Amino acid sequence: MTVKAEKSRIPLNKPKAAARMAAVQALYLMDVAGTDVFQTMQDMEQHFVPEDVEGFCLEKVSKQLFRDILQGVLSDQREIDQLIHTALPDDWPLTRIDITLRAILRCGAYELIKKLDTPPKVILNEYVEVARDFFDNNDEIRLTNGVLDAIAHKMRALDMNPTIYG
């Protein structure tokens, strides 16, 4: 799993953005290598040093957010996957989704459900940028935006459209 661009579009000098990218990568590694969450966290955190890892620097990762996203996705995966499934087009079941894209959607959905202190538009924008870092095809980027937007409107309608309630 490598970032397609020479330089990430994610502001990886910002701890939360770097944590989101790291969480997506950790979920991908767990899916591919079959490692458990604790081993994966330990392996990933060893890379949170001031050096390039797959083309970007992870030195400023918010370890707290990284751990929260990773553990949260795993503990709430059934709820998250159900939300993603209902937001996907009928001809795109979750099992058909690319591993990287599935990791992006799970992380984004988790934050939309549980991280109520973060505006949903921030979450949407950051995960769309993560998708841009990994995919050249606009289909995956649009799918990321569409699925996470649908989840945001379902789970955080007031935050997404404050004028309808005010």
Image (cartoon, rainbow, N blue to C red):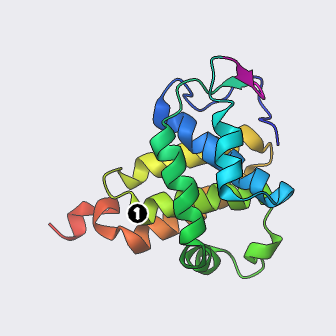
Of residue 61 and residue 43, the one placed in the foreground of this image is 43
State the residue in front, 114 or 43: 43
State the residue at coordinates (75%, 78%).
93
The image quarter in which residue 116 lies: bottom left
Give me the residue at 51% from left, 69% from top.
Answer: 150
Q: Is residue 120 above or below residue 10?
A: below
Residue lying furthest top = 50
User: The magenta stretch spans which residues?
Assistant: 51-55
Q: Is residue 159 left or right of residue 137?
A: left
Which residue, given by chain and number where applicable, does mark 1 sit on? 114
Residue 139 visible somewhere in the drawing: no
For the point 65% across and 53% down, the residue is 38
Q: Position of residue 55 (x, y in %)?
A: 76, 24
Q: What x and y, as percent, mark residue 117?
A: 31, 52
Main SS of the magenta part reads loop
Front-most of residues 42 and 106: 42
Q: Residues within 10 Å of mark 1 (few under 14, many from 20)?
A: some
Q: Residue type at mark 1: give it.
A: Lys
The quarter of the displayed image where residue 143 is located: bottom right
